[in-house]
Amino acid sequence: MRVSKLLVALLVFVPMTASIVRPGQRLGNSAAVESAHLGQVHFAVSCSPPAQKSFNTAVALLHNFQYEEASKAFGEVAEQDTHCAMAYWGKAMSLYEQLWDFPSAAQLKQGREYIEKAEQAGAKTERERLYVAAAAAFYQDGSKLSHDARTRAYSKAMQSLYARYPGDVNAGAFYALSLVALGQNKQAIAILDKLFAQYPGNPGVDHYLIHASDSPELAPYGLAAARNYAKIAPDSAHALHMPSHIFTRLGYWQESIESNLASAAAAAAATKSGRDNEQGYQRHALTFLEYAYLQSGQDADARHVIADLATVPGVSRTALMEDHALFQATYDLETHAWKDAAALMLPPADGYLGDQVEICWTRAIGAARRGDVAGARQDFRKLKGAYAAMHAAMKKQGYNPPPGESVLQMEAEAWLDDAEGNHGQAVKTMQAAVHKEGPDGVDILGMPAQEMLGDLLLERREPSQALAAYQAALKESPNRFDALYGATHAAELAGNVEQAHLYYASLLKICGPHADRNELQRAKIYLAQRPGARASGLASR
């Protein structure tokens, strides 16, 4: 569940303190979970009163992307009322993880069977029939139907449903989510903003508004929802985590840390209790937690996160090995531990292709930046091979990966050019990476190509140009440690004393109480030497 530049074609991926975590409770011996801490959902259906209560819980779980628990809860609804058509609608929708994995052929077949059961049960109201019809549009038979065609058919049906019932907050939320799945985020925000003002307790509205806003450009639109979501759904590990997407985009590191500590604790509790297997949610939260610690200069805490991977309940040995390598790659890249980066162990050849791409990319950069030209060339060749294999796999699965060389390849190639002494070409290649990254923006846990351009220019002793690159990177990814520190160094070399002071002050401001990054000592000495200088906030928080 890691987010990186190489996955943007596959995923639209894509929470506040630990004290508010309350593990969910079972309803007797039932497999379904009902809790007052999943958000406020009322989804009226023409089913029995007990089934209606369970149905609300099931929809809340669905809104929170707790898909396995939602499926169990909808199953309970069907047991309570065998004629409740919407129970089977819910079972079908629990198979459709709209922003994550597309249903397999077997899941599409299973979804059609649930829709047939819903149709046989006979929805008793027009509104319910429209919900079933929308799901049927997605699960329609046709092996040659593309992912995009199914998604668009479902979205169009939900648009009609919401137009017919504009007072149905859940219809509005589900329609907006379908727009996010299609990449129409601004349209989704327009719908969800209005719903948020009316229904701030509905978990779907908060959740989908965060997803719709999960980009450098749109992140401010999701801040209110981010600060509200975990409060209304503290029983959901995913709800506790999701606000950190906005906090990360805005560079609010302490809020992100609190969010993911709470999420990881809730996920671990759910797994240990047997309520749900949430080791994936826990690992995802730890990914964001490590990143936030690194951006706030807390290297020791970041290392502890890597060590804590081994304590995740239910994690497989293979997943643990893959995660450890990826977490270590992030640590080495962010702390400029180039020797360690170049020596990262390669994932198994038959393992996940995305992991191979990321590790080869990190190794190539590490080798190049420590002057090992032969090693960098070898890892760059491996990177190209792994990326080509991933491209082919994506096409086979029905995705259309972006054409041409990836941003990752361009970045590694630029550093290889630089190591080989082709400094002018290195800058041109990195500028091309910046240009290609521009339309979609940097990945949420990524190092911006603009920031790498700043590092490259700084090494070439071009401080003014480097400062401009760092400033551009900070606009897109505020408060990243490396960009702030690079900007201070570039400003010093350019003779811009006042800007150096401002960036040093900003660097100290974003660092946590346990910050131990070596560069901070230089910042403290510099500021101490100029006690009368104006300390202002270039940091956005």
Image (spheres, grey):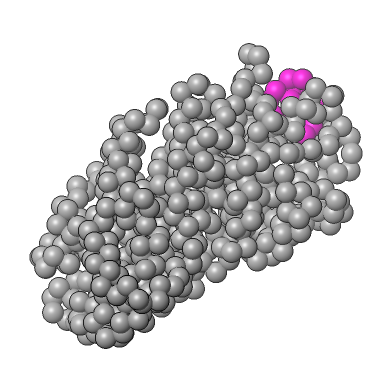
Query: Which image quarter: residue 502?
Result: bottom left
Image location of residue 195, percent across then percent down: 76, 54
Say if residue 153 shows up in the picture.
Answer: no
494 relative to 437, above or below: below
Residue at x-position 66% and y-position 41%: 232
The structure residue drawn at horizontal position 36% and vertical position 77%, both measured from the top left corner, is: 533
**Would you say the magenta stretch is mainly helix, strand or loop?**
helix
What range is drawn magenta here? 74-87
How many labels sit on residues? 0
Q: Which image quadrant: the N terminus?
A: top left
| 17 over 505 or under it: above or below | above
Residue drawn where x is 17% and y is 53% of the image = 340
Instruction: Look at the image and say whether residue 83 sits in the magenta stretch.
Output: yes
Q: Is residue 317 visible?
A: yes
Of 134 and 293, which appears nearest the observer?
Answer: 293
The residue at the far top in this view is 29
Counting from the top left corner in percent of width and height, residue 135 is at 72, 44
Residue 106 lies within the magenta run: no
Image quadrant assignment for residue 45:
top right
Q: Where does residue 146 sit, x and y in percent of width and height?
A: 58, 55
Residue 454 vertical position relative to residue 82 in the rendered view, above or below: below
In the image, farthest residue toward the front: 532
Point 70% across, 23% down: residue: 76
Q: Nearer the viewer, residue 83 or 467?
A: 467
In the picture, measured across the screen, residue 38 lies left or right of residue 534, that is: right
Percent x, y for residue 245?
Answer: 51, 54
